[in-house]
Amino acid sequence: MSNKKILQGISLLLSLILITSIFPIDVNGQTTDTGIVTDTATESTKNSIIAYFGIVSSNSYIRIEPSAKTGKNIMGVDGNPITLSKGFVVPILGQVPSQDTSYPNDWYKIRYVYMNTGVEYECYIYSDNVIKRPAAIYSLSDNEFENSISLFPESYKPYLRALHALYPNWRFEARVSTIDFTQFVKTQAEVKQGNKGETTSQSSIHKTRENESWRKSSSLVDGKSWYHAADDVVAYYSDPRNFLNEVDIFQFESLAYSKTGHTIEGVQKILNGTFMESQKITDLNGNSISYAEAYMIAAEQSKVSPYSLAISTILENGKTGTMLTNGSRGYYNYFGIGSVPGGSPQENGLAFAQTGGSWSQEMKNQCLIPWNTPYKAIVGGALFMGKSYISIGQNTAYFKKFDIFSLEDGTAIHQYMQDIEYPVKEALQAYKNYSALGILAYSRTFIIPVYQNMPEIPTALPGTTALSLVADAGKDMILSSSYKMTGDYISGIQPGISLEAFKTGFILGQGVTMTVNGDKVGTGTTVVFTKEGLTKTYTVVIRGDINGDSKVDVSDLLMIRNQILDTTTLTPSQMIAANIDGQGGIEIVDLLNLRNGIIGTYTITQENIK
């Protein structure tokens, strides 16, 4: 059989898989498959469609019946049973009782495609070996949502509406401050004299940021790595409206511990690929435990998110660790507490781990000072963050950096870090980890600050305030854009965005008009900018939205299939949108990734679209 025919056969099968794999479940929690029972719906899931997928937690055979008895395995081309490896993701069609007394718990009915042959199986896997996750859950009505964001200014709402359309289970809570925004930025951009004669900064930029316009001066803050951040940079990172997108929004996520929302599996996923992945440490009773277990214990005692604790450690020390974590000096400080400028910040952090600095003796005892073991440093550091930040309202990555609470009393000095970009970095790590776990759509709360007298237009970063879109005429047509504008295309747009929300992503220069052709924003939509008789036309590209309806669904999958089968010819913008993984041309892997994106087991990003 020719390679093309094999590709055609597999592509047809994969498209059929998608069409049937988003398995409908009625509002009472019952599937339409006779004899298959799913979770019973609660009041909060009324009028919802619920779908589930499973993450294989240990290598497992798949069976033709819900039983592990001889003859029930599905065999591969090599004559051995087909094994699903740990981490493999499958759609769950239902849940059935076991037919094998040796395996007393329920089995999940799943759909699986054996790629060696392209054969699709509806088969069974033992539930103990699978982590079950919902792919779609309950959402508020639009009226309820509008009421829930009523405390936000109008300039916030288009972004929040766009996020709500993507993730209806997310909640946005306004933290309305009495602080004037200009005064807040002035305080955060302040340069002070340290107690050892050195200059210190409320907000710093790392030396790897080579754009000199981001710096207040050419002098390094600590003599090695950091510069004072320019006022415009502080204004940009302080304004929440610059970060109301599906990635950066996580700097506003509540960092409080959730017994049901945070799992040891999730922590381990974050730690994979770091020095903490498989190492063991010793608890206070002499027991050998994993790092993931240590972070869960720390979370339970401190009431701080274990995901945030793990991410903070990685951001502070990288994936390979530093002298704060390797024990070379006999002390540990995983979160860099007390690692202040002046000399070597890490040396200062280790000195703090030994003595507790100026803490009271009671605080030192509560936080397990001295931190002379990894366990004490993790749990003790978490207890400090819980007592000193989370419990007093600095319960997001943003609030840990920007101390709006004490500024209301005239100080604004209680911040966890000086790095102005830290909240954005933590947000990106959180987004990546939630995507990998398949839990982006889960219910979560974002606490977003609102200041007094905020500017109508958020401050842009230095160096990005003017995009020259008509280069030959030297005319600055757009002052700022939330999207990537490359060549003749606009990308970085989320599916389902409203026309109103899309337009708010552009700030036009004086005399510039903008025309969007059509009543929705999807792949192929053209956007025309005009000034003084000059025009520039862009075409929208949204990865996964191939037919241009601003949705990512089965119809898009069929268009990729037809392209592979040579039964249709996609336009240039459609070809870009169909390249789901951003690699090479339109291939089987794009079909599979789109299918998985629709059922919620793969994240289709709108980044790096070329």
Image: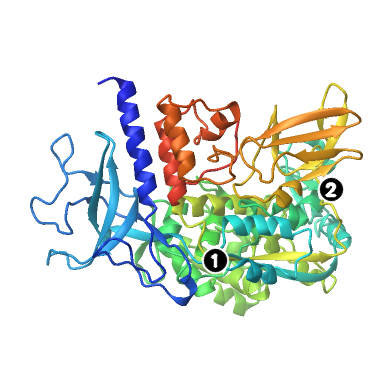
Tell me the SS state at disc 2: helix
Q: Residue at x 84, y 33 (%)?
A: 530
Give the number of the disc on residue 267: none
Q: Quadrant of the N terminus?
A: top left
Residue 284, by quadrant, is: bottom left
Q: Position of residue 381 (x, y in %)?
A: 56, 66
Name the residue carrying label 1. Answer: 139
* Camera-nearest residue between 438 and 523: 523
Q: Mark 1 or 2 closer to N-term?
A: 1
* Camera-nearest residue between 110 and 235: 110
Asked whether, in this view, residue 598 is left or right of residue 192, the answer is left
Looking at the rendered image, the disc whose residue lies closer to the viewer, 1 or 2, is 1
Asked whether, in this view, residue 595 is left or right of residue 158, the answer is left
Q: CA distance from mark 1 to mark 2?
A: 38 Å
Q: Position of residue 135 (x, y in %)?
A: 44, 57
Tell me the SS state at disc 1: loop
* Camera-nearest residue between 312 and 23: 23
Q: Position of residue 25 (x, y in %)?
A: 38, 63
- Residue 120 vertical placement versus 534 (above, below): below
- Residue 419 vertical placement versus 409 (above, below): above
* Camera-nearest residue between 235 and 331: 235
Q: Amino acid at mark 1?
A: Ser
Q: Position of residue 410 (x, y in %)?
A: 85, 71
Name the residue carrying label 2. Answer: 232
Q: Residue at x 78, y 47 (%)?
A: 221
Count residues near mark 1 (Cα–Cα under 10 Å), then give few for <14, some for 14-19, many for 20+.
Answer: many
Q: Which residue of the protein is positioned furthest toward the bottom in this rendering?
A: 362
Q: How is the image coloured?
A: rainbow
